[in-house]
Amino acid sequence: MARNITKHKRCRGHQKAISKKKSHSGTESGLRNFSLYINRVLKEVAPQRSISSRTVDIMNLMINDMFERISTEACNLMCYRKRCTLTPEDVEKAVHLLLPEKLARYAVAFGNEAVQRYVRS
């Protein structure tokens, strides 16, 4: 069962209705589950190590929280620039604002590399 939720968002002075369909098939809170990827990365980095399910849940919450922070900041930057389209520059700026300097540089570099691999495939 899906229901439509309508929000009104101002963009460049125009009033728009944004429609979202909400499904109840996965998690109720709307958080994505990254446990498979957490385990894959761990096995790639340290094959002999394992991780408890509680630790995976904590890592999953941390990833979802950081995703939400970055997306919120990128959306704010988009609105400050009076644009209706989220650009990669907005996301990069949000990462630089939220993460420490060295970690932000690595995150942006790996993100750009991942996008390039996706475009090439």
Image: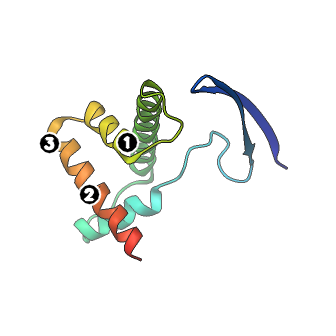
Residue of label 2: 110
Q: Amino acid at mark 3?
A: Lys
> Circle 1 sits in a helix, a strand or a loop, which is it?
helix
The residue sitting at the right extreme is: 1
> Circle 3 sits in a helix, a strand or a loop, which is it?
helix
Residue of label 3: 102
Q: Is residue 82 above or below residue 52?
A: above
Q: Quadrant of residue 7?
A: top right
Q: Amino acid at mark 1?
A: Val
Mark 1 and mark 3 residues within 8 Å of each other at the beta carbon: no
Residue 80: x and y in percent read 43, 24
Give the residue drawn at x 40%, y 37%: 70
Mark 1 and mark 2 lie on one chain; the one further toward the N terminus is 1
Local crowd size for mark 2, using a 10 Å CA cut-off: few (<14), some (14–19), many (≥20): few
Q: Is residue 84 above or below residue 80?
A: below
Count of picture labels: 3
Q: Which mark is residue 91?
A: 1
> Closest to the observer: 14 or 40?
14
Local crowd size for mark 3, using a 10 Å CA cut-off: few (<14), some (14–19), many (≥20): few
